[in-house]
Amino acid sequence: MKTIQLAEKMARFQKSIFTELAIYKRKKVEAGQRMIDLSIGSPDLPPPDYVMEELSRSVQDPSLYRYSLEGTPELLQAIAAYYERRYGVTLSAHKQVLMTMGSQDGLVHLPLVVTNPGDVVLVPDPGYTAYAAGISLAEATPYPMALQEENHFLPDLEQIPEEICQKAKLLILNFPGNPVPALATHEFFAQVVAFARKHQIIVLHDFAYSELYYEQKPISFLSVDGAEEVGIEFNSLSKSFNLAGCRIGYVVGNETVIEGLQRLKTNLDYGVFLPIQKAAIRALTDTSSFSDDLRAIYKERRDCLVQGFRSIGWDVNEPPASMFLWARVPEGFQSTDFTYAMMDEAGIVVTPGVAFGSGGEGYVRISLAQEKKLLEKAVLNLKESDLLERGKQSL
């Protein structure tokens, strides 16, 4: 009998750092250590009551257990109306809106639609890990765009070599970002539109954290003049409405790209459970204070953690949006070393920045998806360890 061999492309898909951290965390727990997990961006808060009530009603309807395909007309219209209300963007629900099984589903599959093997994809470094997975699946070639603190974590498009621009088919952006919780400016997005037009590049903007902001509301890429000619925007109900496990998101924008992704998706799946779509419609059409209340909770958590860390000598940046801190590690550490030291000596799980690309070295990503009392305990644990002092002594 022949030995089973996986496809060569599977060499590009290794176990993620999140799996490694989970295994190490489990060992620590089994050894009796209490751990505070601030590594995963999975919302710990419930969806709105009215969304759960709609889902509960809908699952009792036996007519809603059929295939749903690319999204009901009612859902697509609700998405279009939501974009008009929240961002002033007018969309054709029929031609410019497509439901996905969470935004990650679309993010990973889109490179298959718009690139050929060997084409270049301009990708943020550090960047969300799903981008690399989609590029690998399409057998395209990533070109990292450095996100540096001195440039407000915006990629410098002028630094991309001309020969790379000529080969590039796709540009991926993510503001507010994961892992870097930065915001884009209108001026930057206008520059992106001009860059994409010049080099005939499609723009993918990942807007999954659009509703998790604090002092300043993020800008939809599609609200910038000319953006619909060159790009699309992915969004999700996972973070905005705490519906991560329901796996429902959407993509809006350029008709040609939307049609291409729709064509691919009809060959891959049969859509999202119809009761979940009904719950999503209820979320998108609601005008209650839920989003404001959610932002207030995350702001309290952000302030608790930022102020707490600063009070014990770790000067971390205050994020303007998203559910993460992007914190420079103390002097004397690299990101992975500091991550494991945090687990060993403070019982805190974070994610090393290098897990999101080489540009993430020197940082860790810290999730706010835990209740305030656990964040306060994390600060106390770190204070009682000598990690921060040891970093200073190593200089």
Image (cartoon, rainbow, N blue to C red):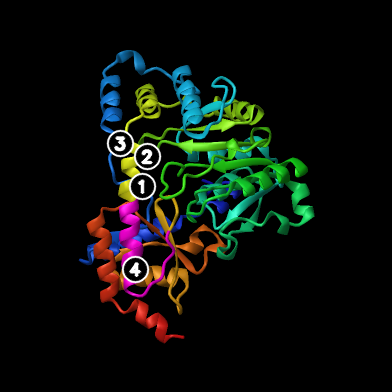
Q: Amino acid at mark 1?
A: Ser
Which tag, 3 or 1, sits closer to the chain's start? Answer: 1
Between the residue at mark 3 and the residue at mark 2, the CA separation in whole angstroms equals: 9 Å
Residue occupying image coordinates x 26% and y 53%: 371
Residue occupying image coordinates x 64% and y 27%: 255
Which residue in the structure is indicated by mark 1? Answer: 42
Nearest-to-viewer mark from 1 and 4:
4
Between the residue at mark 1 and the residue at mark 2, the CA separation in whole angstroms equals: 7 Å
- Helix, strand or loop at label 4? It is helix
Which residue in the structure is indicated by mark 3? Answer: 47
Which residue in the structure is indicated by mark 4? Answer: 309
Q: Is residue 24 left or right of residue 268?
A: left
Between the residue at mark 1 and the residue at mark 4, the CA separation in whole angstroms equals: 22 Å
- Helix, strand or loop at label 1? It is loop
Which tag, 3 or 2, sits closer to the chain's start? Answer: 3
Which tag, 4 or 3, sits closer to the chain's start? Answer: 3
- Vertical side of 150 occupied by 332: above or below: below
Q: Is any part of residue 35 visible from this angle?
A: no
Residue occupying image coordinates x 47% and y 66%: 363
Residue 339 percent location from the top left of the image: 39, 68
Mark 1 residue crowding within 10 angstroms, few (<14) / some (14–19) / many (20+): some
| Residue 18 forms part of the magenta stretch | no
| Residue 314 forms part of the magenta stretch | yes
Mark 1 and 2 residues: CB-CB less than 8 Å, in contact?
yes
Q: Is residue 59 left or right of residue 198?
A: left
